[in-house]
Image (tube, helix red, strand yellow):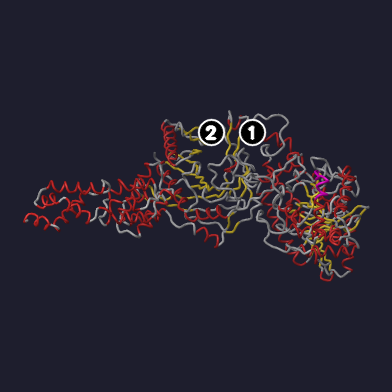
């Protein structure tokens, strides 16, 4: 794979922007019956006018800022014309550099972490357009060219979309995947998107090998597929070159079921989009106020989180494991201010709680799956103070917490309260014979006493070693009981 | 004027001298009498509904709760969305179209107590200057049935001329309110761009057009304008300004404070008879104390081509949506694919002038031609805007509204260039985004002709006050 060059075009829906780009319909249409999340504006009916909505505009500017972009002076919308069944106006309101237009990002160098090598890398972002998503169409036999019916659902029509276009700086499939994952994570951190929603993002990739022609691969729907599609395509191109052939410049479609890229059946005609600025949408100046509102959305970024956690002496894998889930990262940062043992905290959240959630098919990316910080702080403190063995937390507490993150801390660790000094004393008083055996040096007696204590508290979260220690200590304190018994 | 102004009607209704129901019955009777020959309405509300609404207005008038347009009958151009009546823009493409939302201006009319009579004929998608290009047949000029009423708001103007409504809404993309006003002897205002919401106006050329008031007197136009003007959150191009005009307290302009400029470029190509009538009006105003000054604004010679280039570009874009999926018109035979559906729908359901403008619009926006045509036109537009802003800072810019009195049917539509030339004086205000008022200035060969005044951006009040002065000077329209 010498001389592989990859550039990406990533379309990300601003699912969390609240509204569609130009009307009040919802930005997240999942689960709604077809054509129920629509109004005259997003149906593109004549006379209905687009009005930029604050949520999507602020989210787009925040995204541009978070990715380190140069901002234009204003949000300028351009019409891009093409006839397509799911495009109700037969033009898309987007952004365009030229014909008096400007994209929301005029260029950036974006830094991302590659968790394969633990290196920070960078990719140049050429531009980002803020635009409206079309509806969704479904065809019968023969597809778009021959099907007698087209069914269109306009619930998606008008949902705000960011089109992120990179320069061909990426060097391999794994690199491309890391970049997309980090980009999506950044947008998730600023509350712009939820990349786990079905159809929340799509990727097109341009790839060339050994300075040959570039091939565009369309319709890649997940980050794993980005890697797979690129691996396949690079192999395909390499084989052509090795056989002495030449790669043709073309557009191919990623078929994820078969794991191959395929040429698009019909050649796209010469692109003619008739760009011109949308006369219904005067340029929206990016004022200081607007910037401020956008900036207030950027409370945390994945880079800061990762660096903070590794700065606490936590290993890279665990730090990254936490960083990947914004709610988990926020929980870590809040809790870490109150506990000394950050490594235990990180392990608890990034390894074992995450694992317990995964066992239940849940993800710590959803805030409602996570316990309140107080619960976590208490658990770590109990471990720190030796009151509770970590194994007990992992084996007994976390599975319960994963089931119900709101479980009160008391009912999570009832055993802790029972293994007290007085309990040990009570057991020793009752088991006077064993106590005296122990004091006489009989090892078996100690095991018996430990068993007696455990029987008292149920075999819950107890650390036999700790009980052993407590018994030995208490036994010496009340040594005289045996001496008295012997002397009498 | 053969019929009373809406303002006079309003006063008589408030004083109790006029029974709104009786008045409505008169209007309905005129509609029955004239519609067969004029064909100004494309759809009408049922008479019993109109009379019912009028009855409710009586109660409000009696109880002193009359709203600004209480009991007045208003006709609405058929490119403005109404809930109850179809909105077709006079196109076969939208035959019977009722999408279930209403234009902001119509909501404001209803809230002001207006009673909507029906929807008026127009050139298809407002593309035309004579109302001959309606898919549902032309409208004739009530002043002379052999002649056109002007366009594209010809139906609204004709209705006012024969007394088939008290007030009317039109839309003006390049003169579509003012030219019909001129040809029918009525008054029309093209407002400052952004004064009136376009929400619910079927778009032709968004950056140029405005909905505007039409009436039989200047005060009528002021009254209707005061109701429809104002910021609308649903139209991002509306201006955040309130208190545009107060029709109640609008006094004629003092001629001594009036300065009029007449750019010679706007008189070129004008019929001698029209120019003569225009000169004599200016003479009368001068006599009353106004200063009249001939000026030159050479860039105005480029206005017509720049206007048509921009209008056609925007039209091509706006009309792309009519592809046979969401709109009523379908091809006569079942298409075999989606592409065929689009092609056949657009071939069969658009009129030829609409198709001409779409094709030319696509051409001027295409890669390789965009710089030469569309972008060049936007540069000329900027120059015109700057020149007109500067001119209207120091004077009211005046010209005849149209180069000729109303042509006969068929006289202009055969040759697109002759048709487009009717707009030579009016397009300037649309390119510059400034307000322009057209009002009658007398008759030529027995036909009414209008004068148009152009003022500074948001200068509607000045124009309307000037209009009142002119009515006084010419001795009509009082009331």
Dot 1: chain letter: B
Crowding at dot 1, Cα within 10 Å, few <14 / some 14-19 / many 20+, comes out as many
Q: Secondary structure at mark 2?
A: loop
Residue extending furthest right? B446
The residue labelled by disc 2 is A264
Dot 2: chain letter: A
- The C terminus of chain A, quarter of image: bottom left
- The N terminus of chain A, quarter of image: top left
- The Cα–Cα distance between marks 2 and 1, rounded to whole angstroms, is 19 Å
Look at 51% across and 48% down and name the residue there.
A164
The answer, for residue B320, to whether it is visible in the render is yes
Q: Are marks 2 and 1 on the same chain?
A: no
For the residue pair B384 and A102, the one nearer the viewer reads as A102
Q: In the shown orientation, is residue A191 left or right of residue B346?
A: left
Residue extending furthest left? A487
Crowding at dot 2, Cα within 10 Å, few <14 / some 14-19 / many 20+, comes out as some
Asked whether B32 falls inside the magenta stretch, the response is: no
Q: Which residues are magenta?
A: B42-52
> How many numbered discs?
2
Relative image position of residue A358 (x, y in whole percent): 38, 43
Relative image position of residue B156 (x, y in whole percent): 82, 50
Q: In the shown orientation, is residue B187 left or right of residue A474?
A: right
The residue labelled by disc 1 is B338
Residue B109 picture quarter: bottom right
Relative image position of residue A3 (x, y in whole percent): 41, 41
Marks 2 and 1: which is nearer the front?
Answer: 1
The answer, for residue A105, to whether it is visible in the render is no
In the rendering, which numbered label is found on residue A372? none
Q: Secondary structure at mark 1?
A: helix
Q: Is residue B338 above or below residue B275?
A: above
Relative image position of residue B186 (x, y in whole percent): 85, 55
Q: Is residue A360 above or below residue A409?
A: above
């Amino acid at each position: 794979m010498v001389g592989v060059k990859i550039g990406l075009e990533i379309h990300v829906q601003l699912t969390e922007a609240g509204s569609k780009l130009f009307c009040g319909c919802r930005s997240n249409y999942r689960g709604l019956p077809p054509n129920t999340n629509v109004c005259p504006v997003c149906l593109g009916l004549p006379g209905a006018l687009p009005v930029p909505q604050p949520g999507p505009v602020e989210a787009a500017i925040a995204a541009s800022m978070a990715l380190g972009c140069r901002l234009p002076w204003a949000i300028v919308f351009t019409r891009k014309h093409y006839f397509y069944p799911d495009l109700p106006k037969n033009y898309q309101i987007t952004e365009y550099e030229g014909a008096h237009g400007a994209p929301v990002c005029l260029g950036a160098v974006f830094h991302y972490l590659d968790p394969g090598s633990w290196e920070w890398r960078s990719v140049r972002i050429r531009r980002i357009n803020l635009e409206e998503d079309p509806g969704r169409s479904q065809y019968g036999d023969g597809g778009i060219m021959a099907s007698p019916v087209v069914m269109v659902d306009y619930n998606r029509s008008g949902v705000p979309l960011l089109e992120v276009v990179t320069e061909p700086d990426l060097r391999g499939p794994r690199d491309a995947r890391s970049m997309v994952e980090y980009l999506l994570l950044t947008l998730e951190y600023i509350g712009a998107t939820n990349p786990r929603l079905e159809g929340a993002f799509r990727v097109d990739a341009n790839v060339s090998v050994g300075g040959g022609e570039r091939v565009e691969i369309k319709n890649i729907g997940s980050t794993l597929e980005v890697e797979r599609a690129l691996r396949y395509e690079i192999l395909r191109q390499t084989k052509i070159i090795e056989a002495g052939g030449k790669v043709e410049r073309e557009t191919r479609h990623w078929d994820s079921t078969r794991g191959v890229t395929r040429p698009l059946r019909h050649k796209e005609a010469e692109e003619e989009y008739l760009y011109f600025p949308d006369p219904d949408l005067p340029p929206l100046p990016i004022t200081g106020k607007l910037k401020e509102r956008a900036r207030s959305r950027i409370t945390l970024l994945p880079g800061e989180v990762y660096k903070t956690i590794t700065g606490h002496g936590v290993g890279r894998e665990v730090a990254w494991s936490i960083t990947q889930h914004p709610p988990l990262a926020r929980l870590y940062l809040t809790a870490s201010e109150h506990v000394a043992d950050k490594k235990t905290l990180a392990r608890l959240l990034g390894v074992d709680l995450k694992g317990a959630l995964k066992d239940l098919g849940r993800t710590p990316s959803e805030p409602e799956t996570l316990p309140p910080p107080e619960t976590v702080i208490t658990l770590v403190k109990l471990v720190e103070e030796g009151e509770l063995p970590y194994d007990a937390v992992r084996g007994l507490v976390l599975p319960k917490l994963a089931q119900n993150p709101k479980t009160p801390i008391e009912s999570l660790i009832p055993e802790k309260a029972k293994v007290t000094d007085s309990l040990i004393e009570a057991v020793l008083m009752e088991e006077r014979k064993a106590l005296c055996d122990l004091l006489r040096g009989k090892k078996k007696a100690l095991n018996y006493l430990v068993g007696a204590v455990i029987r008292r508290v149920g075999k819950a979260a107890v650390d036999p070693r700790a009980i052993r220690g407590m018994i030995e200590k208490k036994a010496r304190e009340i040594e005289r009981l045996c001496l008295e018994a012997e002397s009498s | 004027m053969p019929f009373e102004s809406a303002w006079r009607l309003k006063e008589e209704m408030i004083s109790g001298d006029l029974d709104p129901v009786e008045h409505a019955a008169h209007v309905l009777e005129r509609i029955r009498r004239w519609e067969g020959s004029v064909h100004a309405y494309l759809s009408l509300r049922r008479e019993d509904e109109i009379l019912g609404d009028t009855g409710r207005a009586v109660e409000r008038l009696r109880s002193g709760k009359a709203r600004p347009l209480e009991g007045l009958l208003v006709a609405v151009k058929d490119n403005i969305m109404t809930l109850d009546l179809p909105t077709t823009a006079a196109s076969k493409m939208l035959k019977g179209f009722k999408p279930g939302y209403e234009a902001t201006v119509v909501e404001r009319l209803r809230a002001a107590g207006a009673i909507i009579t029906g929807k008026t004929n127009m050139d298809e998608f407002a593309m035309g200057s004579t109302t001959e290009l309606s898919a549902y047949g032309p409208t004739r000029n009530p002043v002379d049935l052999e002649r056109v009423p002007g366009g594209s708001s010809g139906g609204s103007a004709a209705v006012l001329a024969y007394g088939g409504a008290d007030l009317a809404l039109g839309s003006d993309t390049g003169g579509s309110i003012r030219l019909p006003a001129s040809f029918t002897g009525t008054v029309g205002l093209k407002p400052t761009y952004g004064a009136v919401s376009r929400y619910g106006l079927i778009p032709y050329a968004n950056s140029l057009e405005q909905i505007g008031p039409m009436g039989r007197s200047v005060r009528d136009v002021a009254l209707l304008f005061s109701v429809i003007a104002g910021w609308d959150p649903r139209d991002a191009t509306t201006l955040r300004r309130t208190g545009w005009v107060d029709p109640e307290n609008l006094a004629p302009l003092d001629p001594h404070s009036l300065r009029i400029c007449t750019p010679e470029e706007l008189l070129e190509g004008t019929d001698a008879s029209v120019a003569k009538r225009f000169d004599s009006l200016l003479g009368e105003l001068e006599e009353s104390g106004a200063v009249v000054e001939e000026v030159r604004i050479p860039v105005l010679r480029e206005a017509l081509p720049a206007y048509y280039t921009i209008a056609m570009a925007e039209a091509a874009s706006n009309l792309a949506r009519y592809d046979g999926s969401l709109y009523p018109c379908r091809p006569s035979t079942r298409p075999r694919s989606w592409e065929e559906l689009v092609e056949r729908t657009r071939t069969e359901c658009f009129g030829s002038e609409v198709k001409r403008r779409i094709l030319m619009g696509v051409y001027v926006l295409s890669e390789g031609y965009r710089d030469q045509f569309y972008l060049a036109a936007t540069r000329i537009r900027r120059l015109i805007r700057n020149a007109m802003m500067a001119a209207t800072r120091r004077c009211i810019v005046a010209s005849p509204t149209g180069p000729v009195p109303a042509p006969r049917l068929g006289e202009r539509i055969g040759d697109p260039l002759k048709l487009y030339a009717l707009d030579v004086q009016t397009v300037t205000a649309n390119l510059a985004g400034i307000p322009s008022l057209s009002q009658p200035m007398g008759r030529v060969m027995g036909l009414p002709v209008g004068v148009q005044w152009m003022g500074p951006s948001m200068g509607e009040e000045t124009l309307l006050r000037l209009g009142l002065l002119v009515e006084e000077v010419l001795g009509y329209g009082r009331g």
